[in-house]
Image: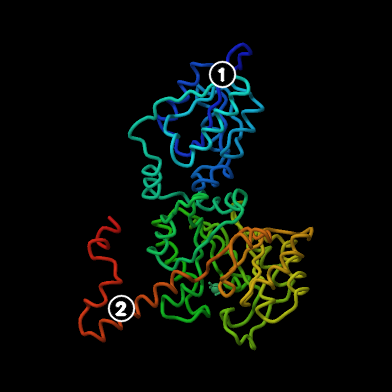
Amino acid sequence: MIRKKTNRNKKKVYVAFSADILHEGHINVLKAASQFGDVTVGLLTDKAITSYRQLPHLNYKQREIILKNIKFVNKVIPQKTLDYTENLNSIKPNYVLHGDDWRSGIQRIVRKNVIKVLKKWSGKLIEVPYTKNISYSKMKSKIIETGTTPEIRKSKLRRLVEAKNITRILETHNSLSGLIIEKLNIQQKDGFYEFDGMWSSSLTDSVSRGKPDNQSVDISTRLIGLNEILDVTTKPVIFDADNGGRIEHLSYTVKSLERAGVSAIVIEDKIGLKKNSLFDNQKDTKQDNIKSFCDKIKVINKSKISENFMAIARIESFILGKSLSDALKRANAYSKAGADAILIHSKEKTPKQIFTFAKKFSKSKYYKPMVAVPSTYSKTTEKQLIDHRFKIVIYANHMLRAAYPAMVNTATKILKNKKSYPAERNLTSIKKILNLIY
Ligand code: SPV
Ligand code: MG
């Protein structure tokens, strides 16, 4: 093996990369950098990258291994923010190299700051011509087209929870809604926004098949639908498994989910005939006892193959009119039994109930990341959830609720007018729908 020695007399060169999809443009910059001295690469962590764009396909370790083995690189260190200041101050490089493509857009401010910091020790920014005909977004779409591996997809949820203040999940009930979640992103003044993953909801999965949310749609049927979504997406999935079914069957469900590349299973602590939690009348609904539910969590953890697969325990105490102390007792027990996260459910109009829970549970020695489902308390902002230490937000049914009135309105208009023209105004054009997927 060739050891790369750092030459004390050589100049120090710093290059920052996210290096998700490595291409010849990176190599051009690194080659140029190595001509000025010893090259340290500041490799952006998942956290730094998600502050301005999507979680990279490869995790930090994988990206580090690739860079360390490039002959122009002497050292790789983590760069924990998009801003270079911390690393520059500790290394005090003579040069920073970057492609000349960062003079506009989000990187403009970062660039300005690099120049300012380098000035302190008369360091210089050298910009090399950006390698033409390379588009990160085109390459990213290629990855979507090609697909992903179950393991890479599965690991993404844990990475997101570690990297982001809040992981934003939206309900999907078919491939088209999955594709919208996959592709939609917006650039706002304060940053880049997108959905991080998908919620496979028992409610919308059932309703879109014309059946009630009471497990009439069996797990195999749900997995068929899910696989169709997985075929055309790369983002992680959280699977709503109701109460997990019979404990004797649970290990098989976990295996099927893992094989498909699902990141997390959510099980709720209810027993008996399943009834959706948002119904007002929960008279006949029974909660599981703590011990039996903990046993289910243990079965999930025992049957899972990958450490990346997560067990999320969903507490229904508030749904069933039970007290805060009941919810807390359960949260601690479920966490101790091995749950990776706690979903505290509520059907109140305000988040008061879950925030009171969050304040107490965040202080518990058994604290685990918390998950919120703001279906009824929908005025609650992500910022408020972050302030209460929620790490995942699930918008649990919105895609189906959006599609349903649109379809009913269109059908009504055609029926009323005995022609389709009046409905056209609210429809996607035929041309657009033909070209939506090609
Ligand atoms: C679902 O989306 O199926 C859920 C959330 O489990 S809730 O409808 O609130 O029960
Ligand atoms: Mg459900």
What residue is disc 2 on? Answer: 410
| Residue 187 horizontal side relative to residue 47, left or right | left
Where residue 130 appears, as percent x and y from the top left, is 39, 30
Mark 1: give few (<14), some (14-19) or many (20+) Cα within 10 Å.
Answer: many
Q: Is residue 190 above or below residue 371?
A: above
Where residue 175 appears, as percent x and y from the top left, is 39, 63
The residue furthest top is: 9
Q: Earlier in the sequence, mark 1 or mark 2?
A: 1
| Residue 299 horizontal side relative to residue 60, left or right | right
Out of 64 and 18, give the one closest to the viewer. 18
Q: Amino acid at mark 1?
A: Asp
Q: Where does the N terminus fall, quadrant-wise? A: top right
What residue is disc 1 on? Answer: 38
Q: Which mark is residue 115?
A: none
Mark 2: give few (<14), some (14-19) or many (20+) Cα within 10 Å.
Answer: some
Where residue 17 appears, as percent x and y from the top left, is 51, 34
| Rendered image quadrant of residue 332 | bottom right
Q: Amino acid at mark 2?
A: Thr
| Residue 324 horizontal side relative to residue 397, left or right | right
Out of 232 and 18, give the one closest to the viewer. 18
Q: Is residue 92 above or below residue 348?
A: above
